[in-house]
Image (tube, helix red, strand yellow):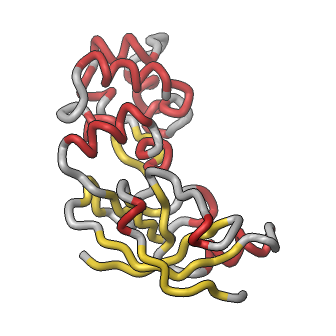
Amino acid sequence: MKLEGYVVTDKPFAEANLSRSQVVYKDIDVPAEIVKANPSWLINHVSLEITNPFINDPTDPFVDMGNFRDILSPHQYQTVAQKKGKLLTETNEWERIQERHPEKGLMEIYHQHPKEFDKLPLWASVAYNCSGIYDHLLLSGYDGAIHAAEGPHTPVTVYHTFHPARITFIETLCV
């Protein structure tokens, strides 16, 4: 699907170093807030193409861990669980799991209650910037994801492209 949106850069678009997992905002509101706080930064109107999104849910800033189970090896899945453990346990879903399984830690839930572990949400932007997840999404043929921005910006839609070379510059905007 051909999409348009906005990328914030700290230098002209042609000179900017885009992330390999680049966020493009559907609407200009969040980029305008970012530039207001960083007046030397620029808002770039861009187009991009995402043909096989991993997730297409513009209302949810999270992705459940279970969505990665089939694309990661068991060892890689466990590694991501351990590395992102703090974020996984700072969620409402973790509190619900703790009510059912008090005194069990994250990795005990991982091993003893995998279906419950799979429901734990991870911020989508964190997940797609995790090299272990990103690399396997690419290998599985996914070229991006569509989700909501995290934090106070929800429910702003974000296009997360895994191929920043597919981003085409249209113009720099003045706010």
Whether residue 3 is situated above or below residue 145 in the rendered picture: below
The picture places residue 91, in percent across and down from the top left corner, at 51, 38
Whether residue 115 is situated above or below residue 45 in the rendered picture: above
Residue at figure coordinates x 41%, y 70% from the top left: 167
Q: Is residue 13 left or right of residue 48?
A: right
The picture places residue 37, in percent across and down from the top left corner, at 80, 68
Q: Is residue 69 left or right of residue 25?
A: left
Whether residue 149 is situated above or below residue 76 in the rendered picture: below
Can residue 119 be seen here?
no
The picture places residue 130, in percent across and down from the top left corner, at 45, 37
Q: Which quadrant of the structure image shows residue 36?
A: bottom right
Quarter of the picture containing the N terminus is bottom left
Q: Which quadrant of the structure image shows residue 32?
A: bottom right
* 108, 45: nearer the viewer: 45
Can residue 127 be seen here?
yes
Residue at figure coordinates x 22%, y 23% from the top left: 73
Residue at figure coordinates x 43%, y 49% from the top left: 124
Residue at figure coordinates x 38%, y 23% from the top left: 100
